[in-house]
Amino acid sequence: MKPSPPAACSSPTSAAPSVKIYQPEGLWEQSGTGAKYTQDHGDKLYRRSLYTFWKRTAPPPAMLTFDAVTREVCTAKRETTATPLQSLVLLNDPQFIEAARVLGESLLKQFPQRRQRPRQHGIQKTDRPRTRRHRNQNPQPLFTEQKELFTNDVASAKKLLATGESKFDATLPPRRFRAARR
């Protein structure tokens, strides 16, 4: 059932028809079937990946990147990999960008003061229990790099915050999202 955005962005609806999530433009047209992909909107975009519409000739690319089986043959056990392409999907796919933004907004609302340590709560919401090897990995350099980049490039920050169909919450404190508010 991977990939699926964090619960901060998912819809509680279950046992309903399949949904058509974000996919690259022209994907079905290039598969040679003559079909046109029409993305769903609203809450349908935020359903679990279990409910994603699947066309065998043009499966969801993000799901294939995360080792989903192609459904052409029976598979007893899925392969698992960790490739640079998976990192690129997590950093660039609208589904994950939007989910990360919504999670960040909910953490800022829940922890309005920086000293309340929203980072720890965010890790608990999104991460599996950390092993000793993973505890030594520090995401702070990436965070610092991205913060500096978006502070200096306001247009890119605004474009990133506008990713996806859900709207950015403009009521959040400007200093916490200063790169996007300048």
Image: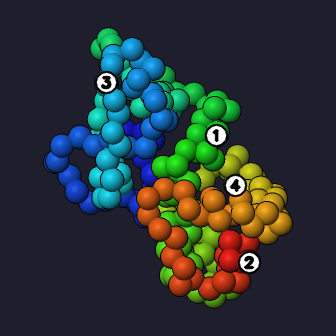
Task: Look at discs 1 and 3 and give the one toward the viewer.
Answer: 3
Spot occupied by residue 43 in the image (x, y as percentages of width and height): 30, 58
Structural distance between the alpha carbons of marks 2 and 1: 29 Å
Structural distance between the alpha carbons of marks 1 and 3: 30 Å
Mark 4: secondary structure = helix
Q: Amino acid at mark 3?
A: Ala
Q: Are marks 4 and 1 in contact (CB under 8 Å)?
A: no
Q: Are marks 1 and 3 in contact (CB under 8 Å)?
A: no
Residue occupied by mark 1 = 87
Q: Please tell me which of labels 4 and 2 falls first in the chain.
A: 4
Q: Which mark is residue 135?
A: 4
Residue occupied by mark 3 = 35
Q: Please tell me which of labels 1 and 3 falls first in the chain.
A: 3
Mark 3: secondary structure = loop
Q: Residues within 10 Å of mark 4 (few under 14, many from 20)?
A: few
Question: Which of the image's four quarters has the C terminus?
Answer: bottom right
Q: Which mark is residue 182?
A: 2
